[in-house]
Amino acid sequence: MKIFLDTANVAELREGVAIGVVDGCTTNPSLIAKEKRPFRPLVEEICSIVPGDVSLEVVALDFEGMVKEGKELAQIAPNVVVKCPLTKDGLKAVRRLSGEGIRVNQTLCFSPTQALLSAKAGATYISPFLGRLDDIAHVGMDLVRDICEIYRNYGFTTQVLAASIRNPLHVVDAAKAGAHVATMPFGVLEQLMKHPLTDIGLKKFLDDWNKASAKH
Ligand code: G3P
């Protein structure tokens, strides 16, 4: 499973990439706005830091606007994947952009039917938002499982990108479901590495080593 960071913060991206386990990045208008930096230099920097795909989202709501913005975003760097929302116009935009060789991540997916249509339209990635479904007392992970099953049944090549991940259990369950990618905040990536028994074990090893005569 690929790991993407769900952030537009360049310090977090540099740190994640330096660890060597970050394969890509997803952004959205909220994450970009949080950085309080001009859009173009910010996303150019992100695309130069991240080794793999970087999702940049359109803000237009209509088909023509999404296609125009999508083409502009795709020019920024070869690793840009255009993000379009899962609406009727968004599906049309996915069909058009993917037909012109521009890769699209279709975002704000909340149902298996939306995901089926997105794959048929030619999306490179589908982004089911787990956390936001959990927020309204639906099991977000069921959606990931359903999409993986449907795509497997028909051999769709659209990759399932588990999004709106809020904790390590979401990552484990996404991996068990067979999601191709999990995108997560930097804090969740840090949580994935930690275990109290690792810290306790390490301390004991070093305490024993320091007490022992073997080191002299
Ligand atoms: O990947 C989508 C993500 O940015 C949304 O996450 O936590 O705002 O639901 P969240």
Image: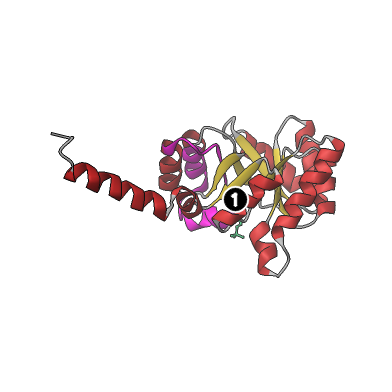
Q: Position of residue 203 (x, y in %)?
A: 29, 50
Which quarter of the figure is the C terminus placed in?
top left
Which residue is under mark 1?
Answer: 171
Mark 1: C-beta under 8 Å from nearest atom of ligand 1: no
- Whether residue 63 can be seen here: no
Q: Position of residue 54 (x, y in %)?
A: 58, 39
Which quarter of the figure is the N terminus placed in?
top right
Q: Is residue 31 magenta?
A: yes
- What residue occupies the far front of the structure in this picture? 213
Q: Measured along the vertical axis of the image, is residue 213 above or below residue 27?
A: above
Q: In which quadrant of this rendering is ligand 1 seen? A: bottom right
Instruction: Please tell me which residue lies in front, 200 or 144.
Output: 200
The secondary structure type at the circle numbered 1 is: helix
Q: Residue at x 49, y 37 (%)?
A: 21
Query: Which span of residues is magenta-colored?
Result: 19-46
Q: Residue at x 76, y 40 (%)?
A: 123
Q: Residue at x 32, y 46 (%)?
A: 202
Type of residue at label 1?
A: Val
Indicate left or right for 147 with 132 as reference.
Answer: right
Q: Measured along the vertical axis of the image, is residue 163 above or below residue 3?
A: below
Q: Measured along the vertical axis of the image, is residue 202 above or below residue 80?
A: below
Q: Residue at x 49, y 49 (%)?
A: 192
Q: Position of residue 170 (x, y in %)?
A: 61, 55
Image color mode:
secondary structure
Q: Is residue 44 magenta?
A: yes
How many numbered circles does the render carry? Answer: 1
Indicate left or right for 153 with 74 as reference.
Answer: right
- What residue occupies the far left of the structure in this picture? 216
Q: Position of residue 103 (x, y in %)?
A: 70, 35
